Image: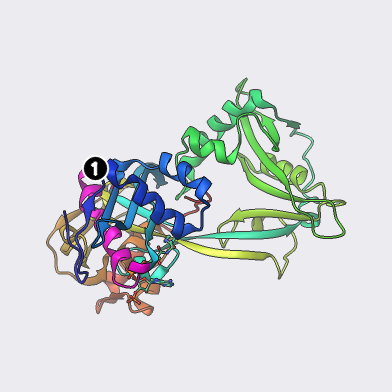
Amino acid sequence: MATVPGVDAVVERATVDDLAGMAECFRLGFGATEAERARWERGLDVDRAVVVHGRDGEVAAASHIRPFQQWFGGRSVPLAGFSPVAVLPEHRGRGLGRAVTAGQFADLRDRGEVIAGLFPASVALYRGVGFEVAGSYVHRRIPAAHLSPLRLPDSVRVRRGSVDDVAAVHRCYDRIAPGIDGAVTRTEAWWARRLPPDLADTVLYVVDDPGRPGELRGYGSYRHGTARPPYDYSVVVAEVQAVDGDSLRALWGVVGSSGSQAPDVEVIGPAEDPIFLLVGAADPRAVRSEIRWMLRLVDAAGAVAARGWRPGLRGAVDLDVVDDHAPWNAGRWRLEVDDGEARLVPGGTGAVRLGIGALSSWWAGYARARTLASAGLLACADAAALASFDAVGATSPPILVDFY
Ligand SMILES: CC(C)(COP(=O)(O)OP(=O)(O)OC[C@H]1O[C@@H](n2cnc3c(N)ncnc32)[C@H](O)[C@@H]1OP(=O)(O)O)[C@@H](O)C(=O)NCCC(=O)NCCS
């Protein structure tokens, strides 16, 4: 049982008796049909849920965690993914959304899940309990005509993949993901959504790795989506990944080659998508939707120790962290960075004062210290300390294309 500052509610660990009520919360929250309720219920792990009960014992609010790992600085960091969070319509507007989110933090810390993440329906809701924006998730329409000029270098042979290649695709991703800050480790369930094992309705292309029989240098997969009249279909890309630039270009060239009948290629990527380093044209009407995902350091000292830092750099910065919802993070810490490793040691002058959300966004590499200061999310009278803070941090925003 727990309470959350500023909210008049008791947050409790869920039991099996709450399962149906949680499913109803999520059904009403996300507009699922009655028929989908059973599927929701099956997907819930009651040990990873907390609830607030209403006056009649009903589940008024619930949150559920899906645990996985996210790569930062070449190390996989245990992540608690909030999925989903919902409050019954008649109980909304009283702080219960905040309560069932913050009510998880102590348990996450005990489990060693040093960071938490989510795709927010309301940024303000989660900012209020210490999350901050850490990355972007943009659905774009890239004209096939911009991709098809990416011709195949003679050295690269793109071939059609089959179900026999699916395991090698997984291994290829596992080879690439550690180098992408923000990429998640994918379980079979995650893969099933992204690349069905039977390749139903999915087109797969691969590039073999000549030096490693049975392994791939890259892969690209897509399905056919609805058409923009008068055309026949669109190309909806699941993913294109490769370990080298030639393979990447060749795969995008094939994926973008259907433009005579499918001029639109739909792609999910970050705001500053690396694909802009390949294509030679820009489409001002490209963005179809754009959201941002959020991150929170649940255990700031644990999270600082868990990620990898830039090799060859040494430095120290004195922080004063504000955290009303995970008080173990609050107070003065000295951040010490040393050649790829870092730690938070209690103490120091507190020269850089910031909320846990701002620290989370900085930790992820999304926001620079100067940007946070300009937004009023960080205060520092010592210009040298501010510059040091930026100098030791990650240099580019993380990329996460797996919605959860
Ligand atoms: C989003 C939801 C969980 C909020 O629950 P709630 O108990 O009303 O939220 P709280 O009372 O704790 O609100 C906290 C803050 O969230 C924001 N917020 C809440 N509802 C919002 C809405 N509909 N639109 C935009 N912001 C909203 C407000 O900033 C609010 O702060 P304020 O009360 O100081 O204005 C609830 O409306 C819901 O279940 N919606 C459907 C499912 C959903 O979207 N879940 C979230 C998925 S990430």
Q: Is residue 315 left or right of residue 212?
A: left
Compare residues 243 and 67 and report the one nearer the observer: 67
Residue holding disc 1: 111
Q: Residue furthest top?
A: 213
Magenta run includes residue 92: yes
**Residue 198 is one of the magenta-drawn residues:** no
Q: Position of 43 compared to 244: left or right?
A: left
Q: Residue drawn 82% across and 47% down?
A: 258
Res 74 quadrant in image: top left
Q: Position of residue 269 (x, y in %)?
A: 58, 55
Q: Which residues are magenta?
A: 90-113
Hey, which residue is sitting farthest front in the picture?
A: 56
The answer to whether one can see residue 396 in this image is no
Left or right, residue 83 beside residue 236: left
* Whole-percent x, y for residue 156 in the image: 74, 34
Does the rendering let one see residue 37?
A: yes
For the point 37% across and 62% down, the residue is 88
| Quadrant assignment, res 390 | bottom left
